[in-house]
Amino acid sequence: MKKYIYTFDGELTIKIILIMKKIEAIIRKSKFGEVKEALHEIEVNFFSYWDVTGVGNEKQGHVYRGVSYSTSDIQRRFLSIVVSEEFLEKTVETLLKSAYTGTVGDGKIFVSNVIEAYRIRTKEKGANSLK
């Protein structure tokens, strides 16, 4: 993306900004191994994940020993991935393909902009800090 900046002396300068994207995905726990492997294959080698509980559209109930239990609380895995804009489409397509089962509850993917990123060890910033 190009950003146009006017300097104090009226000069127009062009600064190229590399946009970073944050992908947040909520997937089935049972698909995590397949998703992780697929992400590594496209060289997305760093991401964070944790187990979460949510409430969704799945309306299921189970009966155990004659007692009905609600299973509206859904156990899922939440992934947080930051990539440069050039890897966004490839990463989302990989998530869509590897997390898919075709049934209700496959999950969601959210994409947002990341203003800046820093690597603590080397103090690199921007897209270079993601490598």
Image (cartoon, rainbow, N blue to C red):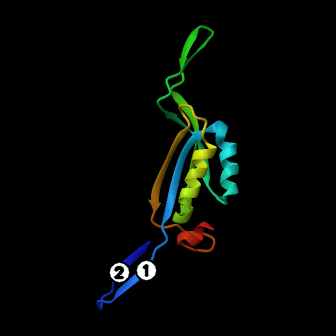
Q: Residue at x 63, y 68 (%)?
A: 131
Relative to 114, say whether 28 is above or below. above
Q: Residue at x 60, y 40 (%)?
A: 100
Relative to 82, say whether 5 is above or below. below
Q: Where's residue 37, x and y in %?
A: 70, 50
Between 84 and 121, the residue placed more toward the observer is: 84
Q: Helix, strand, or loop for circle 1?
A: strand
What residue does disc 1 label? 15
Q: Residue furthest top?
A: 66
Amino acid carrying label 1: it is Lys
Between 58 and 103, the residue placed more toward the observer is: 103
What residue does disc 2 label? 5
Q: Residues within 10 Å of mark 1 (few under 14, many from 20)?
A: few
Q: Of label 1 and label 2, which has the lower sequence position?
A: 2
Q: Helix, strand, or loop for circle 2?
A: strand
Q: CA distance from mark 1 to mark 2?
A: 7 Å
